[in-house]
Amino acid sequence: MSADPFAAPRAAAGRAPDVFKPGAWVQMRQFSEDEAVDFVVVGTGAGGAPLIAGLAEGGFSVVGFDAGPYFRPLEDFASDEMEQDKLYWNDPRVVDGANPLTMGGKNSGKAVGGSTVHFAMVSLRFRPEWFKSRSVLGYGADWPLDWRDMWRYYTKAERALSISGPMHYPWGPKRPAYPYRAHEMNGAAVLLARGCEAMGIAWTQMPLATVSAPHGASPPCVYRGFCRFGCSTNAKQSQLVTFIPRALKAGAEIRDLAMVGRIETDAAGQATGVHYIREGRWRFQRARNVVVAGYAIETPRLLLASATARYADGLANSSGLVGKNLMTQSNQAVFGTMQEEVRWYKGPPSLSITEHWNYDDRKDFSGGYCWMAQGPLPIEWASIQTGSRGLWGQALRDEMVKYNHQVGLKMVGEMLPDERNRVTLDDEVDQYGLRVARVTYGWGDNDKAMIQDALGQMQTSLEAVGAREIFRQEDDTCHLAGTARMGFDRETSVVNADCRSWDIPNLWVCDGSVFPTTGGVNPSLTITAIAMRTADRIRALAARGEL
Amino acid sequence: MTDRYPGYDVLAKRWTQSWNEQTREVINARLATPREPRFFDAAEWATLGAVCDRIMPQPGDRPAVPLPAYVDFKMHEGLLDGYRYAALPPQGEAWRRGLAALEDEAKQRYGAPFHALLGERQDTLLRSMQSGELNGEAWGAMPSALFFAHRVIPDITHAYYAHPVAWNEIGFGGPASPRGYVRMALDRRDPWEAAEAKPGDEARARRDNDRVG
């Protein structure tokens, strides 16, 4: 096996790991710190990686930074829930508010490839109306993006990630067939389908970013079920095995184990580069443009931490909105026990879905939700039993032995933006000496109404398939968004439709932070589609001399 | 409790296509975790051991999963969760203060150290912690319910369900790379998965489990 990925950077000396071959390397171009590169991109996940690749393919000089290691999935990933904690952002953060968020594995990644290294691969499009949710649906805020433009980029993203999915997707405008056929459903997915059919609502097989047939050096998925703990075969189409190799091939440099702590701005107010710590030493990379792609916690943290006398409230923050409107998604669930053996640990955890309630506007609350089949491994299942039912002692062990008969449905629901939900800087510092993020969150009345509705519907579905001993997991949340929203003007948003900050023309944000609303499906495909669009927009702006 | 998966041993798959080298190393290291404390002192260790015995009681007819050792390992290594409730101190400090406070409550209420109490009394104290009713001086500003829900429960139960003994007990397939699984449907098992004992057919399950590998 290769050396410890945490001990020293692997992307160095003109080469980076070849993630497809044990011990092998690929060539990597490297840039001098003293010469300004065209773009520095901070973060290499669902937003950063496609942008790094797109800019490099457009002929720009690009350096992508990630605070985490450069994993070799074939060598570094064990089939083990606890060991794979190493994929998460486990550095200190403080949570408070009426409903403090659970961080760590649920919604963060610290690795080249970001949280796509351990995401559940669910790859869904936003409903078109969500891009105009204020003017069309009457809640939240409008996006400055047109859904037809997004539809084109969704198609590009689905091709780039070789999404496997159903022949026909039941909701929304027509979309092209998915590049790969849908995966076989496991027992948990079949029970979702049976429940929907009993309720008379549509369901479908899940569009997933794991291949159902060979693709390049990726073998088809073998259904080992550890998807959320890193794919050890490279079937999963994470950013680490898709856009990052593309970026390297196009001449981008990746710097792993490189934590950016501050964006430098000059007397004219322009960004000039980033201060970062690598191998124990603070360094400075000069750049003509800086893109922040650290996701909804680290992005505002970096912008706020880069305050100067001129930008006393942090960079790109004349609106006062950096860090505000943090959104998570409701992730409540209903679980029950089946007579049959379900063995939900086999296969990707969510192989079927219903988006019925995302496309029904007769509900008595705003926003939408979907629900999907579940397959928690033992530690997560114990967390649900202890967290939702307060079990411990013999009662916990007695419930846990029913593991192979459990079934569950979990919502992904749209929480509404609220300025009181936010990221600020705490006085505590982390191992780099940087002030940690304080994450404040409380659910609104609309959020609570949606959660109760979804719990009721999911329970009806489980009852319809004969589940017994049904209980609810009332407190879970998942993905993040907001904190640097895009919009139509500098007073009410942080960046424009091109992810360019209103205040500093050579400072950009490209990740889930830019979402004005968060929709009722998993956000990663939308983040990637926006990143691919942003790369095209930057190339177009540069061609017109408007960069 | 009757054995639902008689004879199933996930470690029998250690040298099959369900385990790769990196997984063997990780599980070997877990099984070899030092049993003696490096973070907790003797008094804390005694209290922690008693807490683990109540939170995750284990049958006497098999070697116990050394739960206090895993909690100590996590604190000693400083393995973090990625977030901390504002009302809780950093994890190591939370454990030290929480164990000392529990010990105080035991002595005040029952006049004996926590580890020397009868199980029922230990459970009574733990239930009071769970519902936030423990609020003696030693807790300081730390809410006992938050300590219970976010330190005691996850640190102990996660350690248990990360252990092969627990996987055997619940019939989990365990490590699965590179082989994965083939039979995905309801009521189907691959020959390398645990066989469940149906009433009156325990012998068949034991025979199938002897062949798991």
Image: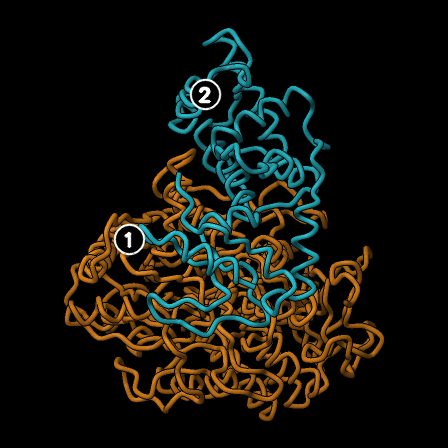
Chain colours: A orange, B cyan
x and y percentages locating residue A415 in the rendered image? 33, 58
Please report contact status of discs 1 and 2: CB closer than 8 Å, yes or no: no
| Image position of B14 with respect to A398: above or below | below
Q: Which of these two is toward me, A263 or A294? A: A294
> Is residue A141 visible from the viewing direction of this image?
no
Amino acid carrying mark 2 in the image: Gly
Residue B82 horizontal side relative to residue A135, left or right:
right
Residue A450 in which image quadrant:
bottom left
| Image position of A422 with respect to A74: above or below | above
| CA distance for labels 1 and 2 | 31 Å
Amino acid carrying mark 1 in the image: Gly
Q: Which mark is residue A336?
A: 1
State the residue at coordinates (58%, 27%): B48
Residue A132 horizontal side relative to residue B15, left or right:
left
Residue B34 horizontal side relative to residue A455, left or right:
right
State the residue at coordinates (52%, 29%): B53
x and y percentages locating residue A352 in the rendered image? 33, 72
Q: Secondary structure at mark 2?
A: helix
Q: Which chain is indicated by disc 2?
A: B
How packed mark 1 is, by other alpha carbons closer than 10 Å (few <14, some 14-19, many 20 or more), is many
State the residue at coordinates (41%, 58%): B204
Q: Which of these two is toward me, A334 or A436? A: A334
x and y percentages locating residue A401 in the rendered image? 40, 47
Q: Which of these two is toward me, A411 or A538? A: A411
Residue identified by numbered label 2? B119
x and y percentages locating residue A539 in the rendered image? 58, 88
Q: Which of these two is toward me, A525 or A545? A: A525
Q: Secondary structure at mark 1?
A: strand
State the residue at coordinates (65%, 19%): B43
Q: Which mark is residue A539?
A: none
Q: Where does the C terminus of chain A fall, quadrant-wise?
A: bottom right
> Is residue A430 visible from the viewing direction of this image?
yes
